[in-house]
Amino acid sequence: MNNHDQLKLTDMNYDKDRPVAENPLKIEDLTFRDGHQSLFATRGRTEDMIPIAEMMDEVGFWAFETWGGATFDTMHRFLNEDPWERIRTLKRYIKKTPFSMLLRAQNLVGYRNYADDVAKAFVERACENGMDIFRTFDALNDFRNFETVVPVIKEHGKHFQGCICYSMTEPRMGGEVYNLDYYVSKAKDLEAMGADSVCIKDMAGLIAPYDAYQVVKALKAAVKVPIHLHSHFTSGMAPMSQLKAIEAGVDIVDTCMSPYAYRTSHPAIEPLVMTLLGTNRDTGFDIRHLAHINEILEREIMPKYRHLLDDSKVSIIDINVLLHQTPGGMLSNLVNQLREMDALDKIDAVYHELPRVRKELGQVPLVTPTSQIVGIQTVNNVLFDDENERYKMITDQVKDLVYGLYGKTAVPIDPEVQKKALKGYERGEEPITCRPAEVLEPELPKAQEEVKGLAVDMDDVLIYALYPVTGKRFLKWKYGKEEPPAEVRPRTLADVKAEEELVRKAKAGELVEKPKKEAPPKSDALRTFNVFVDGDYFEVGVDEVGGSPVLNYIQQMPTQTPLQMPAPMPAAPVAPAPAAAPAPAPEPPAAAAPEKAPAAAPTAAAEGKQMLAPMPGMIVRYEKEVGDEVSEGETVVVLEAMKMENALPAPVSGTIKEIGFSTGDSVAKNDVLCVIG
Ligand code: CO
């Protein structure tokens, strides 16, 4: 790193005098995946990657991360985009740079371990759709969870990058669990499994510069394959850690284009290019070319996403991460969850409870999905426990974790918590110790059967197998069997401009309320027309005044609700009106809906104990039907909140009288899920 003296850096001799580095640092760009996942909840759309794709291909990156992580979930759920199609589309524009994906090992791109048949099919389809590098990690660093996917990656001649999730229990590396020996032995395990490279996956930006130096030095000495460092800027340490890792000989690091960098994302590429310019690790990248790409991102792409950036704080670093050794994304999830439940004042209690829950659940690394599992259980404990009882509401995922369904935890799970969680657990009260997927029955045949007639190919089946509820809904959108809702449509630059114009006008005081005009009385000549504009329907009345037709009222019709005109008020009632005054709600005919509740008393609705949603979420399924008997504590409905499934128990024993929602419905806190009488 000492030949920078030779450089006379002016615009003119920038290229001419730039020596070729002996050992250029390789860079993986994360703009297309982790960048937007970190900064704006993975909402980046394929159409917004295309404008820079070919230029990015010219930079000389070692790889692009284009897929995996939360993309698969977000795309089909919120963007109405086929996740498989993204790989194929980007491949048409990016011909040279290999594609990398983040694979959650046996969790694939979901939040639980899938059966081996699904795991194999998924990796096979990812290979065939064009994925080149599989950055594979397991949230517990239990590499038995790699045993199914790695052979498929290898058979297809693809690059298996083995990850070690970087975790800590102390302010700096060390302590009883996550010390230097831990990382060295994990790296050796990965090399023995055939890893083509080893990645230190610091998903929370926890790695401190001098720890990064130590780890990379130790790993370089222990294994032969290239060492890769993935870190997040969140805490502010990542650029320093990157530099120390480079000094220790790291082979590959991860960056983003600067508009997608920093905050909870990654260090930017541009400062690194200048930092290494003329040294023996010079990237060789043309900074003017990068600047050109940035211009396009700033001008054409970022405005569409700016509203998704978290601008609640001025500071771009989160020192809470330094204080709690916890991923920033997980912290923001906790804050969101508390906010949705009107309990933001409990955040300090959550910070206090978090390390305790984590330790009781086996001191697991905090990464998807364990970060959610630990985080949501922590919130549940803070909200629902009292001084007499802890773990009053245990999520299904915690039960699975405690049972061993995610793998082996770093330290044993607290026996008390284990006993409580597994009481009545459907798979058994005795935890397993084998490779988790060994207890999972094949899932593919059932999935294929369930989407018969809807899924066209294996890619479709896998969308459903991974995400049954939202996956099926997406397939209906995809094949035109259901109209996608307006909120999944992309935001255009025109939308952004219109909004900015409104804001500008409001700030300039140019937005004035329209004075309400009294409608003139309607004449007998009034004619009404139905007018259809796109999806909207208006009833327009035309009344001729002074020889020319004048529009005198426009009534927008609420979708599917019949327009109810208020009954004309009698001018002056002579006699007191009889009891008919309040319009009675139309009573359903006695014989209506015989297929529903045939024998039950038709007027019993809403009598009994209401079971309320304890949190906002989505109905995964009801385990009971109207008319079923339930006993107190028995699961009635499974509610997905913050991606965790919560089995909600009956508050009382009785009969299900009424069910308020069905699978896939969103519910708000305190919505009536069912009535038990
Ligand atoms: Co990351």
Image (cartoon, rainbow, N blue to C red):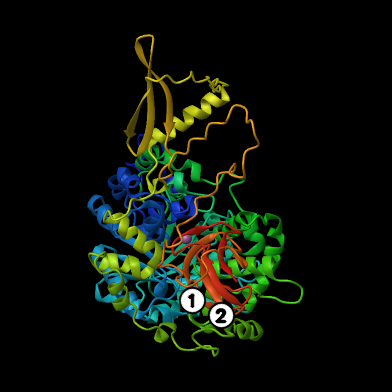
> Residue at (64%, 34%) from the top-left corner?
575
Location of mark 2 (residue): 410
Residue 357 percent coordinates (x, y): 64, 73
Of residues 658 and 648, the one drawn nearer to the viewer in this rendering: 658
| Furthest residue in direction top, as rendered | 546
Residue 365 visible at all: no
Callout 1–callout 2 Cβ contact below 8 Å: yes
> Residue at (45%, 57%) from the top-left corner?
589
Of residues 425 and 677, the one drawn nearer to the viewer in this rendering: 677
Which is more N-terminal, label 2 or label 1? 1
Residue 201 percent coordinates (x, y): 48, 66
| Furthest residue in direction front, as rendered | 575
- Relative to residue 345, is residue 27 drawn left or right? left
- Relative to residue 154, is residue 296 drawn left or right? right
Of residues 1 and 526, the one drawn nearer to the viewer in this rendering: 526
Residue 490 percent coordinates (x, y): 37, 44
> Residue at (58%, 53%) from the top-left corner?
236
Is residue 415 depicted above or below 361 in this figure? below
Of residues 669 and 333, the one drawn nearer to the viewer in this rendering: 669
Residue 524 percent coordinates (x, y): 40, 20
In the rendered structure, find residue 36 and report the number of the disc placed on it: none
Q: Secondary structure at mark 2?
A: loop
Dividing the image into 4 quarters, which one contains the C terminus? bottom right
Give the tally of numbered discs: 2
Residue type (three-letter) at the residue carrying disc 2: Ala
What is the quadrant of residue 250 in the picture? bottom left
Residue type (three-letter) at the residue carrying disc 1: Asn
Residue 307 visible at all: yes
What is the quadrant of residue 595 in the picture? bottom left
Is residue 229 depicted above or below 89 in this figure? below
Location of mark 1 (residue): 141
